[in-house]
Amino acid sequence: MTISTLEFIAIALLLVGMGFSAIRLFLGPTTPDRVVAADTLSVITTAGLAGMAAYFNNPIYLDIALVYGTLAFVGTVAIARAIEGNQK
Amino acid sequence: MNIIGDIFLVIGALFIAVGGLGLLRMPDVYNRIHAGTKAVTLGSLSVLLGIALLHPTWWPKLLVIAGFLLFTNPVAASIIARAAKISGIKPWRTEEQGGE
Amino acid sequence: MDHPQTTRTVSGAHYAFVFSISLLLWVLLSGSLAWEEVALGAFVSLMITLLFGPRFTIYNGIKFSFMAPLYVLLYLVHFFRELIKANFELAMRVLTPSLPIRPEMVEIKTTLESPLGRMLLANSITLTPGTLSVDVTGDTILVHWVYCPPGTDAKMATDAIAASFERHIKRFLV
């Protein structure tokens, strides 16, 4: 479970991206802003889960990434439809 | 092979970080969707490609995840943009275009 | 809302397509080619095709031909080139301190008729340089453009945004 320098840089950059999205999630002046941030965060998490599969050398995390991505997509669509419905 | 996989990982993570920065810097929700979708989609694909090079036997499942991301990300982006438009958010404009 | 495509009857090629897509997904997910695995997958795919085949009307727009896989491949190559270009352009905009954007909503017309073709076009527009499809109503796609040149009308926007993708998609979809 040793990681190379390049892999360390990749993990750091991934965390930077997640941090930026999380800041937008907290700041976001409107609800769609927060939904965009949450959606971005979930896609980054999907890539991160695939990375965890490589780190722990265990392909079960790939299934988790797939299911997580599906649920995140369905959740995003549901929230977006809910925002639309509120304004009628 | 390992070093090429690592390079793809770093490129992907770099695009993801740029996407996050764009999410923070852009002035309104539509422009944020641009940053949050394009950069993060290509970044994730590049990360998945890097992992496929590090662990060549995992490629079928990684291919499914990549195809899934490629198909659902733009749909999610469009549907959020549509929700923002229906809820009455006006697109941000530059001063020259008559915005604030 | 009218969906002329959904009322059309489905052909044998349509059933074969649904079956092969289901089986392909099964094999990719299970990740093994042992005969028991494939046989079970074929059984499940057959059940899905028989039960839900007539309802998968979304696939109705596909033009089945021997050249179709090649056209899909050509489309994918074009798409990935545009995706990579889009990302470098976006990274350039985000990393420039003055943030050079000039956003505008433009409407473009598409000549694609099937729901699947329009969805694929809208998805492609979303992932290509500086454009984001916001809404699809009939043959009109509302697009948010990050850097719209001054004095652009609908015709110019269609040519700049959708024309190249439409040409590729038209070869394998209605």
Image (cartoon, coloured by chain):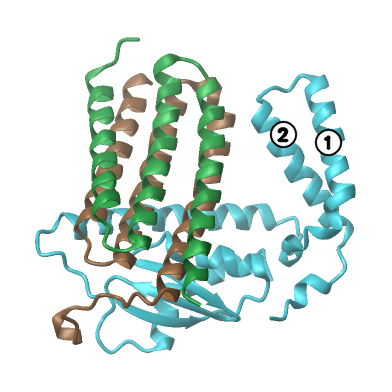
Neighbour class for label 2 at 10 Å: few (<14), some, many (≥20)? some
Q: Position of residue A51 (x, y in %)?
A: 40, 27
Q: Colour of chain A?
A: green
Q: Position of residue C150 (x, y in %)?
A: 24, 85
The quarter of the picture where the N terminus of chain C appears is bottom right
Q: Chain of mark 2?
A: C
Q: Is residue B67 visible?
A: no
Whether the residues at callouts 2 and 1 have beta carbons within 8 Å, the answer is yes
Neighbour class for label 1 at 10 Å: few (<14), some, many (≥20)? some
**Mark 2 / mark 1, whichever is N-terminal:** 2
Q: Position of residue A47 (x, y in %)?
A: 41, 35
As helix, strand or loop, the secondary structure at mark 1 comes to: helix
Do marks 2 and 1 both belong to one polypeptide chain? yes
| Residue at image location 26% in from the left, 59% down from the top | C89
> Cα distance, mark 2 to mark 1?
9 Å
Circle 2 residue: C26
Q: Chain of mark 1?
A: C
Closer to the camera in the image, C101 or A85: A85
As drawn, A68 above or below B94: above
As helix, strand or loop, the secondary structure at mark 2 comes to: helix
* Left or right of residue C146: residue A42: right
As drawn, C22 above or below C9: above
The chain that appears brown in the image is B
Q: Is residue C118 visible?
A: yes
* Left or right of residue A31: residue C5: right
Q: Amino acid at mark 1?
A: Val
Q: Amino acid at mark 2?
A: Trp
Q: Which mark is residue A44?
A: none
The chain that appears cyan in the image is C
Looking at the rendering, which quadrant does residue C66 occupy?
bottom right
Circle 1 residue: C44
Closer to the camera in the image, A19 or A11: A19
